[in-house]
Image (spheres, rainbow, N blue to C red):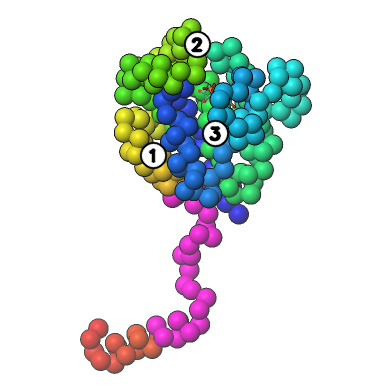
């Protein structure tokens, strides 16, 4: 069986990653979203176990000692980590996995899983991002400032990603992410040999019919 593909979507908070991801995941049954662990406080509207597993720093550090995380990183004062076992299980079952991790985590994943597909979602410019963060109103101004600084830094690393999607128009960004997923699934380096057959079909009836057709053409002299 074909092993699942590991997709990693990265992008500054406020860039619209959540919205793009939700839409792509909703329409793709073969794409599993890996729910990360975080020590960040739960925001209004977020669901524990769906958006994140919200845990204490103690729990997180405990988990780091065991099988723990495929990768983890500190981001603006909080810990975030990708649970290793859940991701492995899906990939082994042939299901493609989508991670939502910041730049350092994404580049760590690439080192561990060289054929992972890294995608960076960027805003058309930093003012647009600042506007989204201010309007969202979920973070204190000081945190927004730090997040913007990180975004500026992260965007400079765009060449380390396999794909860059500019989120100017939401429906374009959604379509572009779907296109990346589809293109990777069709890559000749990934496609499983059982997906198509280079040999003749095993259908005796079809083979018989083709032989008959061929001799008819030969007899009619049309060849
Ligand atoms: P937020 O607090 O806005 O939900 O997320 C902050 C940043 O942490 C985002 O860039 C998000 O992609 C990243 N993030 C979420 N989960 C993980 C994870 O498991 N590992 C790493 N390295 N980053 C994560």
Which residue is outermost to the left? 222
Mark 2 secondary-structure assignment? loop
Q: Residue at x 47, y 37 (%)?
A: 21
Mark pair 2, 1: CA separation: 29 Å
Question: Residue 173, position in %: x, y?
Answer: 36, 36
Mark 3 secondary-structure assignment? strand
Q: Do the residues under discs 3 and 1 have CB atoms within 8 angstroms?
A: no
Mark pair 2, 3: CA separation: 26 Å
Tell me which corner region of the image, top left, top right, bottom left or bottom right, holds residue 84. Answer: top right
**Span highlighted in magenta in the image:** 186-210
Q: Residues within 10 Å of mark 1 (few under 14, many from 20)?
A: some
Instruction: Please indicate whether residue 194 sits to the left or right of residue 223 in the image.
Output: right
Tell me which corner region of the image, top left, top right, bottom left or bottom right, holds residue 171. Answer: top left
Question: Which residue is tagged 3?
Answer: 99
Q: Residue at x 61, y 19 (%)?
A: 40
Question: Residue 33, position in %: x, y?
Answer: 56, 39
Residue 163, above or below 216: above
Per the image, is 80 magenta? no
Instruction: Please indicate whether residue 78 sits to the left or right of residue 67 in the image.
Output: left
Q: Main secondary structure of the magenta part?
A: loop
Name the mark on residue 174: 1
Mark 1 secondary-structure assignment? helix
Label 2 vs 1, first from the N-terminus:
2
Label 2 vs 3, first from the N-terminus:
3
Q: Residue at x 45, y 30 (%)?
A: 17
Question: Which residue is tagged 2?
Answer: 140
Mark pair 3, 1: CA separation: 16 Å
Question: Residue 214, position in %: x, y?
Answer: 34, 85
Which residue is outermost to the front? 44
Note whether residue 12 is visible.
no
């Amino acid at each position: 069986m074909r092993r699942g593909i590991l997709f990693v979507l990265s992008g500054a908070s406020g860039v619209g990653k959540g919205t793009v991801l939700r839409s792509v995941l909703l329409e793709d049954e073969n794409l599993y979203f890996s729910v990360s662990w975080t020590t960040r406080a739960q925001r209004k509207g977020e669901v524990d176990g769906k958006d994140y597993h919200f845990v204490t720093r103690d729990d997180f550090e405990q988990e780091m000692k065991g099988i723990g995380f495929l990768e983890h990183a500190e981001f603006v004062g909080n810990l975030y980590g990708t649970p290793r076992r859940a991701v492995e299980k899906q990939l082994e079952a042939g299901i493609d996995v989508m991670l939502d991790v910041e730049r350092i985590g994404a580049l760590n994943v690439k080192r561990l899983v060289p054929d992972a597909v890294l995608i960076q979602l960027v805003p058309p410019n930093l003012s647009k991002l600042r506007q989204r963060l201010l309007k969202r109103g979920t973070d204190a101004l000081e945190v927004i400032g730090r997040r913007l600084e990180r975004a500026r830094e992260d965007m400079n690393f765009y060449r380390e990603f396999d794909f860059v999607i500019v989120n100017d128009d939401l429906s374009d960004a959604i379509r572009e992410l779907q296109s990346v997923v589809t293109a990777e699934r069709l890559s000749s380096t990934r496609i499983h040999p059982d997906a198509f057959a280079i040999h003749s079909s095993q259908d005796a009836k079809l083979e018989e019919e083709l032989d008959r057709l061929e001799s008819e053409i030969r007899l009619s002299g049309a060849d």
